[in-house]
Image (spheres, helix red, strand yellow):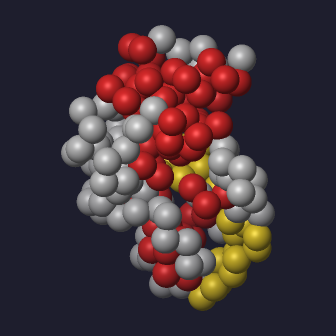
Amino acid sequence: MQVSMTINGDPVSADVEPRLLLVHFIRDRAGLTGTNIGCDSSSCGACTIHLGGEAVKSCTVLAVQADDCDITTIEGLADGDTLHPMQQAFHECHALQCGYCTPGMVMAAVSLLDEVPNPTEADVREGLEGNLCRCTGYHNIVRAVLQAAGDQS
C-alpha cells in the first residue's frame, strides 16, 4: 500500500506492507532513528511520537493508519541548533543516563505540558507513567518537566 505523511514538516511517501508498524516506518523508511524501539508491545514508551498533536506509542500504530497525518518525532522538536525547552530542561537537570528512553520521555512530557501547563510533581509522575526508564529513578526527569513548565509560564 502507498502511504504519505508529513514527518517533522517534511512529506514522506512509501509503499508499505499493511502490517508495518509506524515505528519501523519512521526509522527505516524516513531514516529518523531518534524514535527508539524498546519493546514492540507498548510497555516502555521509548517510541513515543506526536501523531496529529497527540502523544502515541508508535509501536501500537500501523503505518497505514498514519496515512495523511502530521507526525512530530524527537528530531522535529528543536529549532535548528536551539533545543526545545523540554530538551533543554532534560539537559540542564541531567534527566538521562543511557538516553535510550529519553526521546520518548521528552515527547510524552511535551504532550503532558500541552494538556497540563502547570503540573504538580504528582501530575508529572502520573503523566509519564507509561514511559519507563531503567536508569535514572525518575527524580531528575520529574525535575526537568517541572523546570520546563516553569520556563514556559
Q: Horizontal and vertical percent for residue 128?
A: 40, 32
Q: Answer with the quarter of the image where residue 130 lies.
A: top left
Residue 73 seen in the figure: yes
Q: Image check: 82 left or right of 50?
A: right
Quarter containing the N terminus: bottom right
Q: Horizontal and vertical percent for residue 97?
A: 32, 48
Q: Which of 143 and 12 is in front in this view?
A: 143
Q: Given the current orientation, which residue lies at the most extreme bottom position?
A: 15
Q: Image check: 100 left or right of 153?
A: left
Q: Horizontal and vertical percent for residue 6?
A: 73, 66
Q: Which of 65 and 97 is in front in this view?
A: 97
Q: Residue at x 60, y 14 (%)?
A: 118
Q: Residue at x 76, y 73 (%)?
A: 11
Quarter containing the C terminus: top right
Q: How many labels does the image show?
A: 0
Q: Residue at x 53, y 15 (%)?
A: 119
Q: Image check: 53 left or right of 26?
A: right
Q: Which residue is drawn at 43% across and 57% down?
A: 47
Up the image or down, 22 lies above or below 56; here it is below
Up the image or down, 4 lies above or below 75; here it is below
Q: Horizontal and vertical percent for residue 78?
A: 68, 52
Residue 68 seen in the figure: no
Q: Which of 142 and 61 is in front in this view?
A: 142
